[in-house]
Every structure is written in C-alpha cells, then in structure tokens.
Amino acid sequence: MSKEVSTGQSYKQLLVSIKQQVQSAQAKAALAVNSSLIQLYWNMGKMIAENQSLFEGRSNYVEQLAKDLRAEFPEMTGFSRSNLFYIRKFYRFYSSDSVQQAVGLNEALPENSTVQQPAAPNIEHSVQQAVGPGFDLFVVPWGQHVVLLDKTKSVEEAFFYLKQTIENNWSRAILTLQIEQDLYSRQGKAITNFHQTLPEKQALMAGQILKDPYNFSFLTLEAQAQELDVERQLTEHITKFLLELGKGFAFIGRQYPLQVGDKDYRLDLLFYHIRLRCFVVIDLKVVEFEPEFAGKMNFYLSAVDDLIKTNDDQPSIGIILCKNKNKLEVEYALRGMSKPIGVSEFTVTQALPAELKSTLPTVEEFENELNKDQE
C-alpha cells in the first residue's frame, strides 16, 4: 500500500471521528438548551402564578406582560399571550396539591403581594423519586409539554406519557396519536399468567408491554374477515403495527413454520422482543376467546422454546389477540398453563357495505361539486 493511500485512509478516519464528536456535542448542546428553556418556563410560570394579585382588576394582564416581554427581548420567541398562559398552566399543573403529594413539591404560596423570586427548581429530583430513576421532566421539548397540558386529565396520566416520550423519543405527532388512542388506559391491562410462569422482574416487564385492547384502526376489514386477512394487512402496515405493539418488538415472520414430529405447524406472527430478550408468538382470532386457544398457544410456546430459543434467550411469551373475551373464562383457561400467555382484544375499522359504498360520492365527484359552488 502506498504512503498516499495510507495517509488518505487515515485522514478519512480522522474526519469521521471528528464528525462524530461534533454531532455528539450538538446533541448535548440541544438537550442543554431545551432543559434551560423548560426551567425558564417553570420559573416564569411560578412567578406569574404567585404574583397574580398584582394584576387584580386587569383582565388583560397576561396580554400586557406578553407585549412587554416581546419588547424587552425581540430576538426571543415563546412570549406570546397564548404561550404565557401555557407557561402558567405548566407550573400550576405540576405544583398542584395532588402533584405535591406525589412528588414532594410542598411550596406554600406567599401571603403578601410583593414580587417573589423563585428558588432553583427542585422538581427534577422530586419527579425522579415519583416516576423512577433516569426520568427528567426538563428533557422533554416544550411542544410535547403543550400537548400534555391540552390532552391529559391527571398528573399520573401526564407522568406516564412523559416517561414514554423520553424512553421512545416520541415526536409531538406520535405523542398526540398515542394520547388520542388512550395508551394510558390500555397499557398493561391484558389478562396474563406471567406472575405464575415468569421470574418476578421478567413478569413485571412483560406485563407492561401488553395492551388491552390493541387499536388496529389503520386496518379496514370486511365483516367476514378471517385471521389470514388480519395477518396480511398487519404485515402490509408493519410500521404502524410495530408502533401499536410498542418499543422493542422486532418482526421475524408471518405464518412462521414449525415442524413437530411428522407434522408442520405455522405461527400466525413471530416477533423477538429486544428488552425482554425473548421470542413473542402472536395468535390472531377474529372470534371471541375460547379456552382451547390457551392450550394451543401453550403447545406453540413449548415448540418455540425447544426448536428456536437459545440458552441466551428468556422463556418465550404468547399473546392471543381476539375479537372479545370473557375475563373469568380467560383466567380459568390460563390458570393451569405452564407457559407465559397474555390475552387481549383488538379493534379494527369495519369496511363499508358495498351497497352503501355505491351511494357515496367519490373524491372526484365531491371536488367537482365544491368547484360548482365556487363558480
């Protein structure tokens, strides 16, 4: 190898290394800027809320404050009237009595009306104690905070979505979608036997990844659709399917083949969960849950553990997705099973009947009618 070639390769490696350092520094700087901004908003919200008596009799005090702040800091954004209301709401929401009890923010409001300078916010440490280590309220961008202030109904619900946003790096659009689909009420609500069949830590983690019901609103199925129709559409919309399943699922295959003895079997859907380090078998049923479904899943999991699972993998988990279920029936069916199984429902969008479709205008016909009205 010539000296020029060697030097060229070394230079490329140097350039790549420096580029990585710059990108890492940019990311850290962006996080630091965001954290400082959210802490600024927290302090501003505290000052506005605690000194509101200064503006008694003036209904437009926030509007005046916004005008004055924009005049003082013309290069800064975020001082609009509507955003100042959000800033005040942000402080009030996380410093209410219910939150104080949850995260230890027991700051009493002053009795006098003099301007109060806020102390350094301790909400970060307090929320970590309430929600768990590694949770940082100030890491979440302001846009996501605004969505939470608009759409969540309780502090507990907001904390849930804040934690999910941090763990999954959700954008504002994805966060909005998850709230609209009520992930908070569905997460961890499936009926399972995990605590009887898995180690405690694994059972807790596995239970948290399941939802009930799963929302497959991105599918459109005929009333007489069969399991294969659901499978086909789910794999055609695999990105949306994985988003609904949640973080950590890696798709392996549909109608995955297993040979047991002289017979061939096929798994509806097979996944591997990165965090749980185990295979996940999904069995789709477009009917109400029947007890024999649990026995069949138990058989599938035994085969997967023997034929696919390695010594580095945790025990495989089964998820039975059905149209609806009876809670007591599911509990009885799972009680004697040796393999970890969860049962959830799923919802889809039903296709319009053919006779109704024919009476509806097409997009082109609708646009033509609009154009006629505008002429």
Image: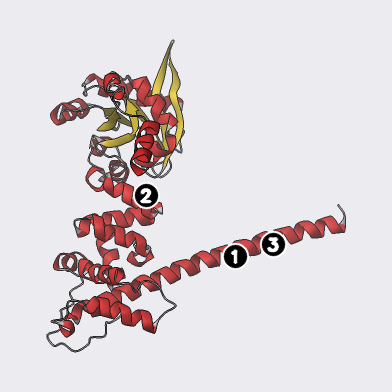
To which quarter of the image does residue 186 belong?
A: top left
Label 2 sits on a secondary structure element that is: helix
Name the one closer to the observer, 372 or 286: 372
Picture coordinates of residue 254 (x, y %)? 43, 25
The amino acid on which the numbered mark 2 sits, given as a three-letter code, is Ile
To which quarter of the image does residue 35 belong?
A: bottom left
Specify whether residue 245 is in view. no
Nearer-N-terminus badge (1/3)? 3
Nearer-N-terminus badge (2/3)? 3
Residue with the mark numbered 1? 21
Residue drawn at x 39%, y 45% is 247
Q: Which mark, residue 50?
A: none
Observer-side mark, 1 or 2, equals 2
Observer-side mark, 2 or 3, equals 2
Residue with the mark numbered 2? 174
Q: Crowding at label 2, few (<14), some or many (≥20) Cα neighbours within 10 Å?
A: some
Name the one closer to the observer, 182 or 3: 182
